């Protein structure tokens, strides 16, 4: 039975692409899907675009493809990447220019239409409220502060790009798994209402979308077969899916790479970021994982089958970002003895002075690095007195940039005039612009009617 092999690319903006080279060299793949975006990434890219209107795509795109394309071209491997971010056309232009400079040829497809900020009035007039998905807040509460808004597109425009012969498909905000679903739908000719096969494709995409996390990276297990037993972290290989026409998949990795593919590593990735395993929503299908079976075949191979699919929803998720004030940050550290007690005293001093000086901040957040900065209220504080060093980090939020800039100046004098053995003061940090996220829903037909696919030759 014919099968298609798809390799995992990046799992986030800034991830390593060296493992993809190993996949190209020894993984016998026909496609690589590379996920560069998170909702946080869009906020980062918006800050880039505010400085340079030609920016807004992930800067790792051009160096990554420059490094990988010679091997990919030689083997006929196609790439699907959401590295276009907020500016997929700009990403394509930058990549095309670099390829042209090197004399390389490729058919590059660009998918646009996910950006809907300039369509808010149109969408609301058509009946979409664009209310906050979690709180129900009215979109008017952020007024004219919205800076970007992008819908999660599905696999359909990516399939169309492949149908038109694209070697590289560049998108903005699409569902992560769509990057891996599209090659399977394209190659096998699956119908858009074949919910069972689409559900299986979504499962495959979900298992590949996080790079090394699918092959033993970030493996949150302990004991004899826990994270310490994962072999060769420095050369960890990214997962590969070999998928048959019925949707059955075998997850593996390139021979000779580090990491591990087994029941436990695959199961952990399967449940990653899943709120309800019986209703895992995507633009193309709703996945019920309840009947999935994972069969550990040994030798870094796990078979995955049995996904159940339900019809897709009539709406698409939208993530928007809006200007949400400014942050001022300061950090100061203390050493043993009584490091935590000194840091607590400094926090009290700072809060007292802010009140006396009538510096009115919307929010003041404190964390004690070395004690509770990661675990927060779940941290065990019973042995706080034994800590060798504790850093106090305080962050304030305010709509006034000047107040944000003023906050770190409340700290330096405490180096000589506060609790003893202070060290590690972070300096006067610049104020940071904050972006709030606005999740919402919009009707599918209103979004997809404006999606476009353009294919050009370099």
Image (tube, rainbow, N blue to C red):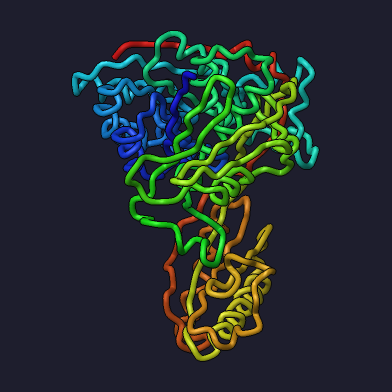
What is the tally of numbered marks visible in this picture? Answer: 0
Between residues 291 and 10, which one lies in front from this camera angle? 291
Q: Residue at point 44% right, 29% down?
A: 6
The quarter of the rendered structure image containing the C terminus is: top left
Q: Residue at point 53% right, 41% down?
A: 302
How far across and down, in percent of the image, does residue 408 sit? 51, 66
Q: Residue furthest bottom?
A: 337
Find residue 84 and report its image quarter.
Answer: top left
How far across and down, in percent of the image, does residue 93 sit? 35, 21
State whether residue 451 is above or below residue 303. Answer: above
State whether residue 96 is above or below residue 212. Answer: above
Between residues 210 and 432, which one lies in front from this camera angle? 210
Q: Residue furthest top?
A: 164
Find residue 81 and report its image quarter.
Answer: top left
Q: Is residue 56 visible?
A: no
How far across and down, in percent of the image, does residue 141 sit? 74, 38
Q: Is residue 110 visible?
A: yes
State whether residue 390 is above or below residue 238. Answer: below
Q: Residue at point 19% right, 23% down?
A: 102
Q: Is residue 264 left or right of residue 31?
A: right
Q: Is residue 278 left or right of residue 119?
A: right
Find residue 280 and report its image quarter.
Answer: top right
Q: Residue at point 55% right, 65% down?
A: 222
How far across and down, in percent of the image, does residue 428 sit? 44, 65
Q: Is residue 133 left or right of residue 321?
A: right
């Amino acid at each position: 039975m014919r099968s298609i092999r798809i390799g995992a690319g990046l799992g986030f903006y800034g991830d390593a692409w060296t493992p993809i080279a190993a996949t190209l060299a020894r993984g016998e793949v026909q496609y690589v899907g590379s996920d560069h975006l998170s909702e946080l990434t869009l906020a980062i890219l918006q800050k880039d675009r505010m400085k340079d209107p030609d920016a807004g795509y992930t800067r790792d795109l051009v160096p990554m493809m420059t490094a990988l394309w010679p091997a990919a071209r030689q083997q006929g491997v196609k790439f699907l990447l959401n590295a276009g971010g907020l500016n997929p056309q700009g990403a394509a232009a930058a990549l095309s220019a670099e390829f042209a400079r090197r004399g390389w040829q490729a058919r590059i497809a660009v998918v646009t239409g996910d950006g809907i900020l300039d369509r808010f009035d149109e969408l609301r007039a058509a009946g979409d409220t664009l209310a906050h998905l979690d709180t129900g807040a009215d979109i008017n509460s952020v007024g004219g502060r919205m800076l970007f808004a992008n819908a999660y597109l599905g696999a359909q425009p990516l399939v169309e790009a492949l149908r038109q012969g694209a070697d590289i498909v560049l998108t903005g905000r699409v569902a992560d798994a769509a990057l891996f679903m599209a090659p399977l739908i394209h190659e096998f000719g699956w119908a858009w209402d074949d919910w069972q096969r689409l559900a299986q494709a979504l499962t495959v995409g979900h298992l590949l979308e996080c790079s090394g996390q699918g092959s033993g990276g970030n493996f949150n297990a302990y004991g004899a077969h826990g994270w310490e037993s994962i072999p060769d972290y420095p050369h960890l290989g990214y997962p590969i899916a070999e998928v048959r026409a019925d949707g059955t998949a075998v997850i593996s990795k390139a021979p000779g790479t580090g990491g591990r593919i087994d029941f436990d590593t695959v199961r952990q990735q399967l449940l990653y970021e899943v709120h309800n395993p019986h209703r895992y929503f995507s633009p193309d299908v709703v996945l019920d994982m309840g009947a999935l079976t994972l069969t550990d075949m040994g030798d870094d191979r796990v078979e995955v089958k049995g996904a159940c699919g339900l019809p897709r929803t009539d709406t698409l998720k939208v993530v928007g970002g809006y200007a949400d004030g400014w942050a001022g940050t300061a950090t100061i550290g203390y050493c043993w003895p009584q490091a935590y007690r000194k840091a607590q005293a400094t926090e009290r001093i700072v809060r007292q002075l802010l009140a006396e000086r009538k510096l009115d901040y919307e929010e003041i957040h404190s964390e004690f690095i070395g004690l509770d900065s990661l675990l927060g209220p779940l941290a065990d504080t019973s042995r706080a007195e034994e800590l060798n060093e504790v850093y106090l980090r305080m962050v304030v939020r305010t709509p006034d940039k000047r107040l944000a800039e003023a906050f770190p100046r409340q700290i330096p004098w405490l180096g000589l005039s506060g609790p003893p053995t202070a060290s590690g003061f972070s300096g006067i940090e610049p104020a940071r612009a904050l972006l709030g996220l606005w999740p919402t829903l919009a009707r599918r037909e209103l979004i997809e009617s404006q999606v476009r696919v353009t294919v050009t030759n370099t």
